[in-house]
Amino acid sequence: MGAADGAVYARHTVQVQGFEVAYFLGGRLENIAPVLYLHGLGATGRWDAYHMAMGTVTRVYAPQYPGWLEGAIPEGLDTVEDYARLMANFLDEVGVGEATLVGHSLGGWMALLLATQQPERFPRLILIDPLGLDVPSAPTADLGGLDDEEFATSIFGRLGLIATAEPNGFGAAWQNVRQGPEFARQSKGRGMAATLAGGSYADDTLTRAVNALESDALLVWGALDGVVPPQQGEVLRKAMPNCQLTVIEEAGHLPMVEKPETFHRVVRNYLIGLEEDIPGVTRS
């Protein structure tokens, strides 16, 4: 997909349960169920490269959670379950029935809730470093209890300088990830996620329900994720009968940011049913 294709991606708003939900919609109208992409801790407020990668093969709906960009949870949305319910009702409002759920981090928690509650509606899942699992041997980090340095070390596979694209689209600049906009977005979102989770990221009811989930699923994990340890991916793979686990080397909690080309290839291959060996990726 080239830069010109970005013009087919448009921003919309819809009223859901009395909340205004902004969302992006775009991609190809193919014989593949549309994707509902549920973002993680950080909302960018724009189309990202991974949305467009999925959009090369299917229609993509990417809502922004109410309050997320502003950094304030609206009254009436008090839990992760509340937001998950809002996202299901969002699909009703935009006229989508069956969909492929793609959820990252907090969005992965919502995706698991929706898939266990409406398995017939969501026959395929892509879960990227999801929160919400109860794995005592490899617990999720306490997002509310981490200081900024600990949080940065947890979400990024490595700290230091990375090349980021210039706003005009030409060339790149070196930027310290700890001081960059991605860290700022993730940091703001983790406080909101901690509030919604009420200090506990281990949903034992959900974890038990996953054992009965027969949806076809792809798990994508950063090998260096310090927020949700990769061991949780192994637990989830063993719990779900129709599941494959893909681990991306040298990536933390944000594989789509740290290893974008690899991430795009992994996700796109799953959507179109292509199996191939990818450098820097292990599958089980």
Image (cartoon, rainbow, N blue to C red):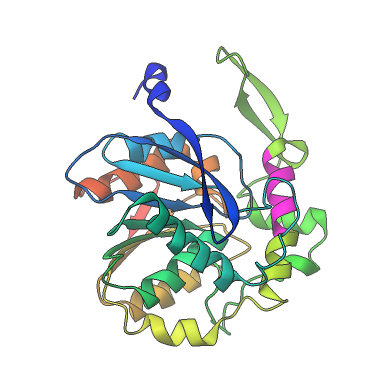
Residue drawn 57% across the image and 62% down it: 106
Specify whether residue 201 is in view.
yes
Q: Is residue 14 above or below residue 213?
A: above
- How many discs appear? 0
Percent from the top left, x then y, of residue 276?
Answer: 22, 46
Q: Give 139 or 112, whichever is nearer the viewer.
A: 112
Q: Is residue 194 magenta?
A: no
Q: Main secondary structure of the magenta part?
A: helix
Give the magenta range.
182-190
Q: Give 277 or 210, whichever is nearer the viewer.
A: 210
Q: Is residue 240 left or right of residue 195?
A: left
Residue drawn 38% across the image and 77% down it: 116
Percent from the top left, x then y, of residue 180?
Answer: 73, 36
- Find residue 224 and report its image quarter: bottom right
Q: Is residue 116 left or right of residue 72?
A: left
Q: Give 64 or 159, whichever is nearer the viewer.
A: 64
The quadrant the N terminus occupies is top left
Percent from the top left, x then y, of residue 188?
Answer: 74, 51
User: Which residue in the rendered view is the most extreme toward the left?
Assistant: 31
User: Which residue in the rendered view is the most extreme toward the right?
Assistant: 147
The quadrant the C terminus occupies is bottom left
Q: Is residue 185 magenta?
A: yes
Specify whether residue 65 is in view.
no
Residue drawn 63% across the image and 55% down it: 41
Residue drawn 16% across the image and 44% down it: 31
Percent from the top left, x then y, of residue 8?
Answer: 38, 26
